[in-house]
Amino acid sequence: MLRKAGHTLTPDELVCLEEILSHSEDLWKAYALKEAFYKVLDMKRTPYAEPALQEWLELVRSADLEEFQSLQKSFTDWFEEIVNALKYQWSNGYTEGCNNKIKVLKRISFGIRRYSRFKNRILYIA
């Protein structure tokens, strides 16, 4: 229930969630930050993504939860890249997939002696 998006919870799950969150203020803050981040992700491909992410980072800072400090540092260090990922639908997923296929092929092709054959197999699968 804690990992499920709040708008998808059933009424029974909401009651159970409220009971769980009532036991710890830090857990309640963490859950609220997660839900706020879902709202930031809903704004991707819009001009509001960057300000929403900045606002979310301010919420993380003000929540002062130790578990979120490394996340906040990473988001601050990579802010421009994360904003670009939210703004644009381009990614290097296809390239990463090809690299992974080549690594797997390299691992299973230990006995291939000629480089030209290995190269041809790479070109065949990619």
Image: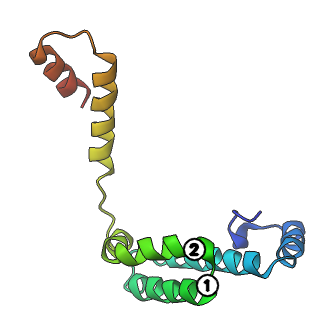
Identity of the amino acid at label 1? Asp
Residue at 71 percent of width and 73 percent of height = 7
Give the image quarter of residue 24.
bottom right
Instruction: Specify whether 90 is left or right of 12.
Output: left
The furthest residue to the front:
66
Viewer-side residue, 37 vs 25: 25
Task: Measure how far apart labels 1 and 2 are at the Cα level.
Answer: 8 Å
User: Residue at left 21%, top 11%?
Assistant: 112
Q: Which residue is mark 2?
A: 68
Depth check: give the residue in front, 47 or 101. 101
Residue at 60% across / 80% down in the picture? Answer: 36
Do we see residue 41 in this rendering? no
Side of 101 relative to 53 (left or right): left
- Classify 97 as above or below 67: above
- Residue 83 screen position, x and y as percent: 36, 76
Q: Amino acid at mark 2?
A: Phe
Q: Is 37 placed left or right of 81 in the picture? A: right
Dividing the image into 4 quarters, which one contains the C terminus? top left
Q: State which quadrant residue 88 falls in.
A: bottom left
Residue that protrudes farthest toward the left in the picture: 116
**Circle 2 sits in a helix, a strand or a loop, which is it?**
helix
Label number found at residue 96: none
The answer to which of 82 and 89 lies nearer the viewer is: 82
The answer to whether residue 112 of the structure is visible from this angle is yes
Question: Whole-percent x and y of residue 1?
Answer: 77, 63
- Please rate how many residues cluster around mark 1, counting C-alpha atoms within 10 Å: few if below 14, some from 14 to 19, many from 20: few
- On the image, the x and y values in percent for residue 111 come to 25, 9
Q: Which residue is mark 1?
A: 64
- Identify the secondary structure beneath mark 1: loop
Image spot of residue 60 (x, y percent)? 56, 83
- Residue 67 vs residue 17: left or right? left
